[in-house]
Image: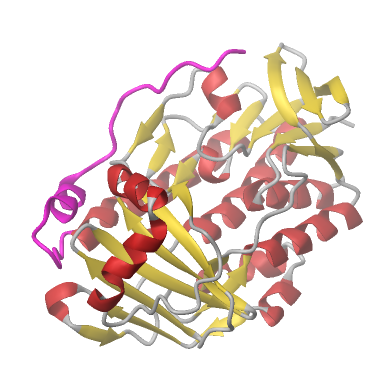
């Protein structure tokens, strides 16, 4: 039976692994973290419910916090209660990423997926398959696979080694803090002159995030306490009380590959397309793209050469639809400042990232 190797064990990689294992395809997922995740609140859009159920993870929604309302303060527009975020359709769920990772890991193991704590150091394709060198805490080894799925996140290591081009939106960084106390079942968003704040609650706490440009994020990380003290009285909706951890930062700019599949490989999740958090589509995209990528790979190793092309076209439509409306959300210009003007008109840059060694 042809085997598939997945580089990356986040939501997209594990969703692909589950989909493959359900189709009885031998699959190994290789991830430096061992497919674990830190506690972090994330929003799962209502539309993701069907995919979550299909992955055999319905209990994750039962255990999550149902978001009852989304409230925003977007500059001159004032305080607005949306009932549900326009991008969500109905309600969503506040998910603890660690709980989700644990549930997906257990589901994958139950289906017979091999999980290895390691990183892909080299990958060599041929006409008959792949030779992949992996480095783990216990040493270096070689794995052989008929097909490879790149789920390495925004770096897209495998795809870029296959000459895929990454197109980026403007630099955008999320600075994140954990809150220790359980939160009300309300997601909040608030504009500021040089970025925007949001809160995502979950059953045991929540996450407060500030999305801004890279230079501002660097200054915040250098003096986080001073920054919080300087802005806490300027916020009318988002509360900074109860922050229980030092901040950490994440690249959250939009990005997309110019092609997401090739001979014996395809990319999924953030490796294929990453969305600005203002769209509320990140986790939904990871789970759905991973599910469809796993099924496309299963079809491909069974001899269906068209399956990756269909997956590519499906992902392209999703990306075009989402990126076409992202700048419009910034175009409301709650503040007439460089940050908001830049993001209101910015698109994806058609430039190649630096080459990745084989």
Q: Tell me the magenta residue range.
A: 331-358
Residue 202 screen position, x and y as percent = 58, 77
Q: Position of residue 259 (x, y in %)?
A: 47, 30
Looking at the image, which residue is at 35% across and 57% down? 211
Q: Toward the viewer: 347 or 342?
A: 342
Q: Is residue 143 above or below residue 220?
A: above
Which residue lies most toward the left here? 336
Instruction: Answer above or below: position of 209 versus 72.
Output: above
Q: Main SS of the magenta segment?
A: loop
Q: Residue sitting at 29 percent across and 43 percent down?
A: 215
Q: Is residue 187 left or right of residue 53?
A: left
Q: Is residue 120 visible?
A: yes
Indicate whether 312 appears above or below 352: below
* Residue 278 in view, yes or no: no
Q: Is residue 150 above or below residue 90?
A: above
Give the residue drawn at x 29%, y 64%.
196
Quadrant that contains the N terminus = top right
The image quadrant that residue 157 belongs to is top right
The spot of residue 19 in percent (x, y) is 74, 51
Is residue 246 rendered to the left or right of residue 58? Answer: left
């Amino acid at each position: 039976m042809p085997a598939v190797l997945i580089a990356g064990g986040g939501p997209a990689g594990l969703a692909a692994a589950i989909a493959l294992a359900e189709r009885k395809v031998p699959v190994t997922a290789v991830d430096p973290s061992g497919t674990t995740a830190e506690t972090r609140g994330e929003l799962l859009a209502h539309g993701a419910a069907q995919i979550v159920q299909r992955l055999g993870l319905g209990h994750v929604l039962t255990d999550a916090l149902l978001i009852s309302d989304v409230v925003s303060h977007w500059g001159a527009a004032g305080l607005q209660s949306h009932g549900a975020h326009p991008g969500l359709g109905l309600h969503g769920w506040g998910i603890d990423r660690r709980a989700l990772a644990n549930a997906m890991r257990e589901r994958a193991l139950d289906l017979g997926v091999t999980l290895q704590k390691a990183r892909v150091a080299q990958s060599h394709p041929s006409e008959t398959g792949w030779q992949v060198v992996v480095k783990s805490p216990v040493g270096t080894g070689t794995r052989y696979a008929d097909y490879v799925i790149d789920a390495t996140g925004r770096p897209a290591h495998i795809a870029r080694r296959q000459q895929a081009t990454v197109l980026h939106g403007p630099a955008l960084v999320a600075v994140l803090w954990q809150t220790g106390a359980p939160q009300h079942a309300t997601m909040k968003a608030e504009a500021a002159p040089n970025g925007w704040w949001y809160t995502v609650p979950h059953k045991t706490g929540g996450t407060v995030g500030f999305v801004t440009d890279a230079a501002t994020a660097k200054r915040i990380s250098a003096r986080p306490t001073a920054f919080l003290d300087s802005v806490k009285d300027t916020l009318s909706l988002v509360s900074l009380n109860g922050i229980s951890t030092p901040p950490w930062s994440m690249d959250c700019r939009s990005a997309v590959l110019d092609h997401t599949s090739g001979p014996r490989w395809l990319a999924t999740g953030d490796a294929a397309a990453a969305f600005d958090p203002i769209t509320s589509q990140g986790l939904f995209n990871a789970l759905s793209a991973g599910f469809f990528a796993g099924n496309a790979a299963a079809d491909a190793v069974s001899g269906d050469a068209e399956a990756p092309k269909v997956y590519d076209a499906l992902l392209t439509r999703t990306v075009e639809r989402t990126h076409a409306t992202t700048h419009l959300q910034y175009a409301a210009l709650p503040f007439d400042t460089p940050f908001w003007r830049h993001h209101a008109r910015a698109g994806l840059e058609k430039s190649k990232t630096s080459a990745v060694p084989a």
